Image (cartoon, rainbow, N blue to C red):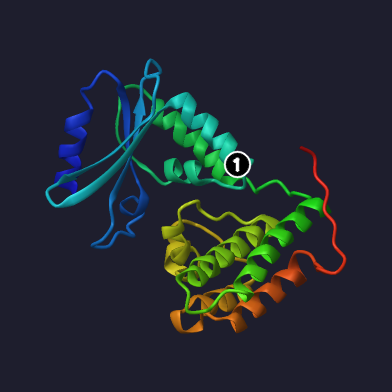
Amino acid sequence: MEKALTQFVNLWKDRDEIVGILLTGSFAVNAANQHSDVDIKLIVSPTQKKSIKGLCEIDGFSFSYIGRTEEAIKRKFNSDFFSTSKLEAKSIHIGRILYQKNNELTSLKEIASYYYSQPFLKKNIADEELKSMMYSLYSRYTYLNKTDIDSPFFVLNYVMFMKLSLDYYAAILNVELFPFDTKIENILTNKEYLEKYNLAPFPDATFIKLWIHSLHKENINKENLDIVYGYMKDKIYPLNPKNFDLSWIE
């Protein structure tokens, strides 16, 4: 992989718009497998008006790269953090500097490490927001109960209901979930992955066990739908469809 990495760096480092190249992701933390992409962060000149993203293959290795200016990355550190995410900070913090014109990446890594070390701000979620979350789940729940279990749209909405349940519960618990659904399995089930990336396990192990069980192909049914919906009612808001109201500002 190092040979392919050198080739990638040589392809990019002499371009006027490139001021830094960073290896991140699984290869940076020695967690890569045969299916892993080589994840690269490109730091581009402030004269660049647009961020860039792309894919390429070198010596059989798939490279996935994204390029932003230093200021854009700093803004993302901040916006991520206040959205209960350290994704950008994590990717820079764990990264290995491959090239920098001056000290752009050294400086960014220091800032990223600071964000990465900070606990998320505690959030007080208003009752109306909790009610809105539960109403959204209730709407899908009632649709699913009226839908034939053999319909492909039952499966579609069942999975969407489960994902929404996880997202809402994570928000209430102030837990970070990466915005990439492909990472959820590792975040919820892979202890080695959590250790490599210094991530805490989801705080409600009972819910995660129930949630994963309900997603197995043979368990996609209305019985498990009822169980997860009941769990959400207990944890989010005890919605009573016979007496419920919700208000919001438009």
The quadrant of the image that shows the C terminus is top right
The percent position of residue 131, horizontal first and vertical second, equals: 78, 58
The percent position of residue 196, horizontal first and vertical second, equals: 43, 59
Please rate how many residues cluster around mark 1, counting C-alpha atoms within 10 Å: few if below 14, some from 14 to 19, many from 20. many
Q: Residue at x 17, y 39 (%)?
A: 6
The percent position of residue 142, horizontal first and vertical second, equals: 67, 70
The percent position of residue 185, horizontal first and vertical second, equals: 45, 66
Q: Please give left or right for residue 112 compared with residue 42 in the image.
A: right
* Nearer the observer, 238 or 38: 238
Q: Please give left or right for residue 86 compared with residue 168 in the image.
A: left
Tell me if residue 148 comes above or below residue 106 in the rendering.
Answer: below
| Residue extending farthest left | 59
* Nearer the observer, 94 or 83: 83
Read off the residue under disc 1: 81
Does the image show residue 201?
Answer: no
Q: Please give left or right for residue 63 compared with residue 107 in the image.
A: left
